[in-house]
Image: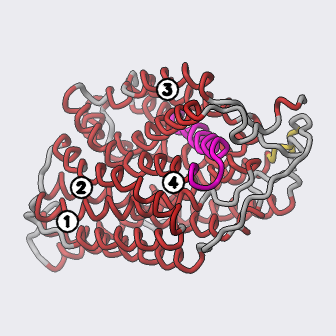
Amino acid sequence: MSSQTMEIPTLAGRSDSRRWWALGLVVAAQFMVVLDVAIVNVALPSIKTDLHFTQESLQWVVTAYAILFGGALLLGGRMADLLGRRRLFMAGLALFTVSSLLDGLAWSEGSLIAFRALQGLGAALLSPAALSILTTTFEEGRERNIALGIWGAASGSGGAAGVLLGGVLTSAFGWSWIFFVNIPVGALLLVVAPLLVHESRAQVNHRHFDITGAVSITGGLMLLVYAMTHASQHGWSTGETIGLLAASAALVVAFIVIELRSKAPLLPMRIFRLRTLAASNATSLLVAAALFSQFFLLTLYMQQVLHYSALKTGVAYVALTVSIVAFSAVSQSLVTRVGIRRVLPVGLLMAAGAIVLYARLPVHGHYFWDLLPAFLLSGVGLALSFVPMVIGGLTGVRQSDAGVASGLFNTSQQVGGAIGVAVATTIATTYTSRYVDVHPGTSLLAGSALTHGFEIAFYVLATLLVLAAALAAVFVESQPAEPQEETSEVPELVLEAA
């Protein structure tokens, strides 16, 4: 293999404007992926009616996407390192765009679920490749922090923007358009990507591919995401839930054993020696658990308790979205000046304070007096949390590991989100039922009963963020180590089956 396939230097031969245009491209793609996680939720009632979904099968519109997305992220990240980051970015983007078209054209339960799974796979290839392109385009330090601040703003606000856009599109044009909106964006990005993004691959002394590691971790994570969804619907103590969790744990343990013995691991365990990276990923898992659940519970509160329409619910999130975007620039500037360790815990505690305000939402809540202050505090806290987390998750990483580090960070978020929503749903449902039991004549759908369940769940989520702040304060390094690069020739790709 010629030297042209080796790692392209981070900044050599790149014009300043071209680097920033490339950043805009990968951030737009990431925003589209994050948006699509949330945009579907608002349209589920319309999808149920038009495609004749049962209540039990409707959740699979979300779950099918989440299983493939969360399960294949590590695999997608390592494939980007070995096969080419631009190549995987474009392949994932093409798959995501085509499957979005198929989603909008779906004619039945089975077809939409299958196409959503395909879309999740496209996202799993696209997202880590996009973040690794950013990492290898900007050198660690001020410029990368600025770039990651923009990335953080897009990722942090995508969920709230998805609810807003989902409400607008569903109300105005129908549910199919929540998928069709991806098509022109994806097509445009595919056209301009070869013009703005250079190809790069990991500069390593092998091209082995850890097949057994890939199968075990992908299967383990997919089972875990499915088990979380199953538990939220059927309970944690059922034999099927316990069996799924046990099988997932066994596959993850097998993956760790395989990686420790592998000559070319899918996930090099040495990456966890980077304390700031390890702490940022652990923190990210807890924050995602709280954030995904926060959007889920707040949407239920506004629609089921305050009786907001889908459109009004989406508009309600504008303040949260704007505050995340506005303070992400402040966040990256603070990280550059004073470091991750001084910014991240503060942001997490502010986000925890906002969730405490959510826990105190009354049955007859008012947007401006009850929701708006919490949204603003939450937006600032999340901006001061997400940006330093993503910077920390890539700090000290070799360029040859950029893809797998990006996949690991995204995996932490997706797994954390799946666990968080499952746990929060269980807690809210349990305490709503208990409220009904001690208040005879109260319906499970009564505002007082629902609000009580949400209150307990929100307090648990706030506790998770306080724990995340403690982890960040203790384990994030004040001065993380600089990355050490490998310099070796790059032979041909070899598949490693053991």
The CA span between labels 3 and 4 is 21 Å
Q: Secondary structure at mark 3?
A: helix
Callout in the foreground (4, 2) = 4
Residue identifier under label 3:
97
* Kind of residue at disc 3: Thr
Residue position marked by numbered label 2 in the rendering: 300
Name the residue carrying label 4. 414
**Residue closer to the observer: 50 or 336:** 336
- Amino acid at pointer 4: Gln
Q: Are marks 1 and 2 in contact (CB under 8 Å)?
A: yes
Nearer the observer: mark 1 or 2; the answer is: 2
State the extent of the magenta-drawn residues as a range: 118-144
Q: Which marked residue is nearer to the observer: mark 3 or mark 2?
A: 3
How far apart are the two marked residues, 4 and 2, measured between alpha carbons? 21 Å
The location of residue 160, given as percent across then percent down, is 32, 48
Mark on residue 411?
none
Reading the image, the residue beneath label 1 is 450
SS at circle 1: helix
Q: Is residue 130 magenta?
A: yes
Based on the displayed image, in which of its 4 quarters is residue 444 positioned? bottom left
Relative side of 30 to 451, left or right: right
* Label 1 CA crowd tier, 10 Å (few <14, some 14–19, many 20+): many
User: Callout 4: 10 Å neighbours few (<14), some, many (20+)?
Assistant: many
Three-letter code, disc 2: Leu
Give how far across and how far down residue 458 sits, in percent: 30, 70
Q: CA distance from mark 3 to mark 2?
A: 29 Å
Q: Quadrant of residue 124?
A: top right
Q: CA distance from mark 4 to mark 1?
A: 26 Å
| Identity of the residue drawn at 9% across and 60% down | 366
Task: Give me the residue at 66% from left, 32% from top.
Answer: 14
